[in-house]
Amino acid sequence: MVPQDYYIALSAILFTIGALGVLIRRNALIIFMSIEMMLNAANLAFVTFANTYQHLNGRIIAFFVIAVAAAEVAVGLALIVAIFKSKHSIDVDQMSSLKG
Amino acid sequence: MSPELILFLVLSLVAIAAAIGMLISPNPVYSALFLVINFSTVAVFYLILGAPFIAMAQITIYAGAIMVLFLFVIMLLGAEKLAPGKVLPYQKPLAIGLAIVLMVESVYAVLARNPSDAEIIVPTEAANSIDAMRDLGIMLFSDYLLPFEVTSILLLVAMIGAIVLTKRAKGEQE
Amino acid sequence: MLLEYLAIAVLIVLATVVALIAIGLGGLFGPKKKTVNKSMPYESGMMPIGPGTRRMPVRYYLIGVLFILFDIEVVFFLPWAIVFRQLGWFGLIEMVVFVAILLVGYVYAWKKGALEWE
């Protein structure tokens, strides 16, 4: 038998690695992938709780999170493409045009 | 050790290793492929947790469609050749320190402060049956009616946003 | 119950092993005589010009995005198709509203020429 806490700890570890990716990497694409991984870690926690409480809410929310992530990727990658067209770089440190 | 625990440990090691691989590999293409491994192992976790439909959605949408889109954009931008920009000197140690704080905090909150003695319920045959799927469908289309309809508006907005951002006006040169 | 998935695991392992054998045997038994001509990218062909990884046009991205968004729509159809007899008219109206909203996006993409390959 596997305790529920193991799964929650794994979810926390994956979330932390995702957050670390956002903080360390300067490539906008990698930052975006890290955000996807954080969403995924949250999903894992949702499905784990749905299992231990034997309730479907967690699974349905995980499903909605997947749908929202797809919509987010569609617009986010389009933004990255648009920024690359004007700046010829996807280094997030270069995106400082609005800085006063 | 029970077989479930061994399976969990092996898979979680693969998931964490793939996540770290995504984090440190210099080439975005490798990062994307590591992320596909990570998503696939999480899909196997969903199967173990008795959610086969979510596992299927994870494979088709996340590991399939979304990561293909990522690879598209990496090739679109030729991003694997980009030179690394200059970074703040204290950024990396500070980030690692903050990540350790986050990790300790979440592990403390879950394992030390509020441990639960609940155990993963190994799914029975019923989890794979059409009835389990039926329960999910009934709940999705009755209790979650509004989120479901709002999702369609979200997808519409994403579609329009992507077209507006990437579509060139007619006649404009590349 | 997890044993039901054993077949899929066996399939994955077999596919990997067969692919590795196919790659490995050639390297193991094939003769390796490297000459200048043989190590050219196209033997007795033109010399390639420019880098190997070329940037792709943005058109591909737009088609990919539209595919993903309609992919999500289809995934929502699956649980609906299983329960649509129980839901009756109510479920049908729900799904018609859902599809109608997405149809607006489809019409917009069509009018904007996002589906054309210029």
Image: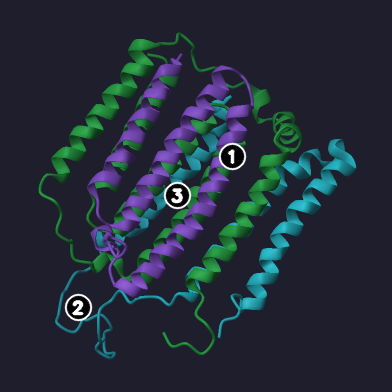
Chain colours: A purple, B green, C cyan
Residue nearer the viewer, B70 or C7: B70
Q: Which mark is residue C15?
A: 3
- Please indicate whether residue B23 sits to the left or right of residue B91 in the image: right
- Tell me which label, 3 or 2, sits earlier in the chain: 3
Q: Is residue A61 left or right of residue B80?
A: right
Categorize mark 1 by other alpha carbons within 10 Å: few (<14), some (14-19), many (20+). Answer: many
Label 2, on which residue? C39
Residue C3 place in picture, x, y as percent: 55, 27
Q: Quadrant of the N terminus of chain B?
A: top left
Q: Residue at x 61, y 55 (%)?
A: B155
Q: Secondary structure at mark 1?
A: helix
What mark, if any, has residue B125 been given in the picture?
none
User: Height in image: C29 above or below A33?
Assistant: below
Furthest toward the right, the residue is C89
Residue tagged by mark 1?
A63
Q: Is residue C27 above or below residue A55?
A: below
Q: CA distance from mark 3 to mark 2?
A: 30 Å
Task: Residue at 42%, 24% (x, y): give it.
Answer: A7
Hey, which quadrant is residue C104 in on the image? Answer: bottom right
| Residue that lies at the very extreme toward the top in this rendered image | B117
For the residue marked with disc 1, what is the amino acid?
A: Phe
Q: What amino acid type is highlighted by mark number 3?
A: Ala
C92 left or right of B40 in image = right
The picture places residue B13, in percent across and down from the top left corner, at: 32, 32
Residue B71 percent across, percent down from the top left: 40, 61
- Given the image, on which type of amino acid does mark 2 rest? Ser
**Residue B113 higher or lower than A51, as above or below:** above
Q: Helix or strand or loop: what does disc 3 sit on?
A: helix
**In terms of depth relative to the viewer, which is nearer, A1 or B139?**
B139
Nearer the viewer's eye, disc 1 or disc 2? 1
